Image: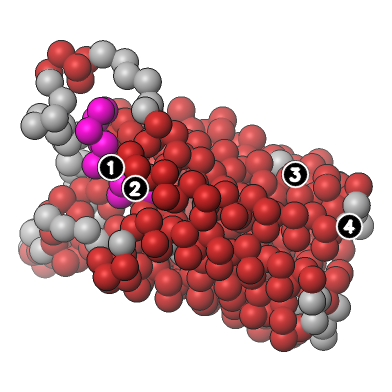
Amino acid sequence: MGGTLLLSLKNKSPKSWYRVSVAAHYFIYGLVFASWASRIPDIKQALGMNEAELGGVLFFIPIGQMTGMALSGWLVNKFGSKSILLKGAILYPSMLVLLGLAGTLWQLSIGLFLFGISSNLFNISVNTQAVGVERLYKGSIMASFHGLWSLAGFIGGLISTLMVAMYISPFTHFCIILTLTLLILMAMSGSVLPRDEQRLEDKSSISKNERKKFTLPDKQICILGLIAFVSLVCEGTMFDWSSVYFEEVINPPQNLVRLGYIAAMFSMAGGRFAADSLITRFGVVNILKLSGTTVACGLLLSTVFPTLPTATIGFFLIGLGVSAIVPVTYSLAGRSKTMQPSVAIAIVSSIGFLGFLLGPPVIGFIAHATSLRWAIGSIAIIALLITILAPQLKKEN
């Protein structure tokens, strides 16, 4: 009888518990990714990789994510986001442990491929859950979820610093993270949104016949996609190469190798929690222009003046600069007057996702051919495209 009562209470969980559950899953998602990204220097050193080899190995993550993209969408559509999220949230941190066991480049490559597939499975299902919860609240709360992802990244960086200081191996570290995530999942599993919301249709601006037809993205959507692409190139570079850059170029004490990563994750989390109010006050175009300039300044500061204080401030600026860009592009895409909001967001996110996938491996190849300072510094030029493109959005509106 007690079990029946508990089940009944779980089935009647208020919307606030659904929000807490989604937030907890975003936290897990960020924590797992941060745990991997912050231990890249240790794994690189353990396997004796150079920059080109690391760049090549890192490319298996996007290969896995691209492989899992269609599969994840089909699974979520067929079985629902709840079922897939409960499985993906276990698989993703489990693959992290597999990475800790890798003893050769090929083992690491296979592990990263599976890590990429499970990441995409988790990503599609948790974002579907987030859309459903946002519908229940009838307002924008997506930025807060992204903020929790970044906050988890910051905490994950701190945990990694502690693990390194205590000479704990990546494998043991990853096992601890797996245990922690399983405990969170056990607490939250009963509050997962049971059913997905139906797809929204903008009937006021798109006719029924138009919704059935394939529509090419207009200039506005293409610009938003390019802005997201550039932002995620910068974001991916920061995630995968910040600790390596500090270790090889800044050369601080070993316990401070992850300082740039931690600074970027801290500022990114704060920026995302503040993004909605700042956009309301200063406008979308001004925030995007400022964001692109801030990212470029951060990249230049950390590479032109490669000292511990300036590089840390530089990576702080990078995290702050990229924090609002992706949420803004998704929001604007959802207001498209020429195509369905869901289709517009999918196009923008897909274009942007390519930047996140391709940026880090390319940095590795450029670094091997020139230097890591030159490779990361050159991204500043690309970041300025955000500032240049932002006013075009104003013309299109």
Q: Nearer the viewer, residue 392 or 111?
A: 392
Q: Inspect this view and state whether residue 157 appears.
A: no
Would residue 231 be found to the left or right of residue 375 on screen? left
Residue contact at pointers 3 and 4, CB within 8 angstroms: no
10 Å crowding of disc 3: few (<14), some (14-19), many (20+): some
**Residue type at numbered disc 1:** Asn
- Tag 3: residue type? Val
Relative side of 382 to 195, left or right: right
From the image, tell me which residue sits under label 4: 371
Please report whichever mark, 4 or 2, sits nearer to the chain's N-terminal start.
Answer: 4
Nearer to us of marks 4 and 1 is 1
Q: Which residues are magenta?
A: 329-341
- SS type, badge 4: loop
Could you tell me residue 16's position as x and y percent? 16, 67
Residue at x 39%, y 68% (from the top left corner)? 272
Q: Does residue 330 show up magenta in the picture?
A: yes
Left or right of 338: which side holds 354? right
Q: Quadrant of residue 347?
A: top left
For label 1, count other residues whose C-alpha is less than 10 Å away and answer few (under 14), some (14-19) or many (20+).
Answer: few
Which residue is rendered at x = 80% and y = 81% of the image? 307
Distance between the Cα atoms at labels 1 and 2? 5 Å
Dot 1 corresponds to which residue? 397
- Which mark identifies residue 394? 2
The circle drawn on residue 362 is: 3
Residue 17 x %, y % = 19, 65
Q: Are marks 1 and 2 in contact (CB under 8 Å)?
A: yes
Viewer-nearest residue: 307 or 252: 307
Q: Is residue 222 visible?
A: yes
Distance of label 4 from label 2 (alpha carbons): 38 Å
Q: Is residue 234 left or right of residue 68?
A: right
